[in-house]
Amino acid sequence: SVSLSADNSLGTFSKLSDIGNGSTNAFTNSGTKDFSMLIPSGEIRGPSLMIGLNDKHQQAFALTTRIRVMNQFNHFDQSLYSTVTSSDHSANQDYEYKTTNFNWTAHVWSEIGLSYGLVILDEGKNQLKAGVTGRYLGGIDYLSLKGNNLDVKYPANSDSFFASNSDLEFASNVISADNGVKNGINASGVLGSLFGSKQGSGFGADIGVTYTYRVGAKEGMPGNNNFGATDGHKLTVSAAVTDIGAIRYNEGNNFTVNVSGNGYLTGLGLSQHVNNYNDFRSYVQTQGFNADTGTKATKVYMPTAFVFSADYQVRERFYVNAAYVANLANRQNFGNSYYDQVTITPRFDTRLITVGVPLTYSMLANDFKMGLGFRVAGFMIGSDDMLAVFSNHQHGFGFYIGGFIPIYRKAPKESDSLN
């Protein structure tokens, strides 16, 4: 499968049809406060396999592969962004900005996962399952800027600005000490991260439990674990912690910059000295800052989250699902994170067909999203946020497409269960 999404609190997107017709105003900045954004966030799920063992413990194993990308700005000052990008601000005015605890991390990485799940309890109408996934993480490319504090004063009619109380840290394996961009994202680099040498490596994990209350279950009869509504559940409740872990980029291919203090900078000066670390360090030191550059190992953390879900059978083939996603990651680390959201999804579900309409409230943009998803046998396509197709006032969009081959387990006969 392939999925791609975008979400932000800075502004809204034009209708995708307008962008397709050549409109140059694809994004409108409408924010007034500090903003955050995930643009883009996406993944490619590669070859994967799950096998369920038809034994008394009802165990299952899975092998999964995945490539993920996240580009995230968290808690950035909107006024500074507007001054730089918008023609509505006059150069004849003085501006002052203060921003704290901000983070920009762009990261591309690969995953190879091994999962194990089993049925802990299976008595009558009650069933309890647990599962764990361990992942080997392969770092491809990243760059990250985090700051505890930055005060900026921009005088009118000047190319210079004064930055005080600066406390910034930058790290990347993409930019070297002598050159600009040293590593590109290409097909060989991605495949190498999965199967060969890696820029960075680490371990990750998911862990979760699921309780199911079934209808029509008989004493001593194990549940039917087929995909879709055929498991006969009346209520399913699950909880999980996902994306535990981090990727370590080693000292040999990783560079860092720490900047603190006060000083004057100019736009021209920055543009002339950002090509490599040594140049940048010399420039900011001559302008009054303390700057330390070098090579050292850096950990880039995964977007750890808590996921709670409840699925209820309204009648026959009609179900409604409620899901809550809560961020658990420390946003002041190098790394990415998710934003809290609540999703309600009514759906029609059979073994052959599923049609669902996810309705989401996002705490990132404090807005409402509506999607539409279809599954026919093992083929699926849809969106969790498709209002941008019709509206000019949406903060994001998201689409996915994919497929799998289901080989169902036959339901056990009652006579078999009594033997």
Image (cartoon, helix red, strand yellow):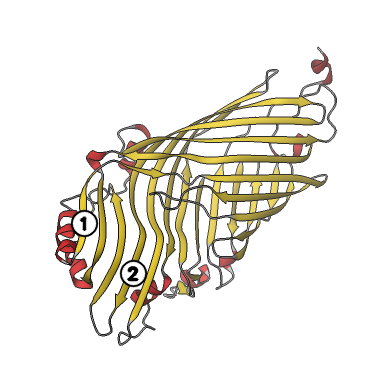
| 111 horizontally vs 372: left or right | left
- Callout 2 secondary element: strand
Closer to the camera in the image, 346 or 72: 72
Q: Residue furthest top?
A: 419
Q: Secondary structure at mark 1?
A: strand
Q: Nearer the viewer, residue 414 or 109?
A: 109
Q: Locate residue 95: give its quadrant.
A: bottom left
> Is 92 situated above or below 176?
below
The image position of residue 238, as x and y in percent, is 67, 40
- Residue 193 lies, in percent from the top left, at 35, 37
- Within 10 angstroms of label 2, few (less than 14), some, or many (20 or more) residues? some
Name the quadrant containing residue 123.
top right
Residue density around tag 1, few if under 14, some if 14–19, many if 20 or more, within 10 Å: some
Quarter of the figure that contains the C terminus: top right
Residue in the picture at 64% in, 50% down:
324
Q: Is residue 310 left or right of residue 364?
A: right
Question: Mark 2 or mark 1, which is nearer the start of the sequence?
Answer: 2
Mark 2: amino acid: Asp
Read off the residue under disc 2: 151
Residue occupying image coordinates x 35% and y 41%: 139
Q: Is residue 411 visible to the viewer in this orientation of the structure?
A: no
Residue 121 in the image: x percent, y percent? 73, 25
Residue 267 in the image: above or below residue 216: below
Pointer 1 residue: 291
* Closest to the observer, 65 or 143: 143
Q: Which mark is residue 86?
A: none
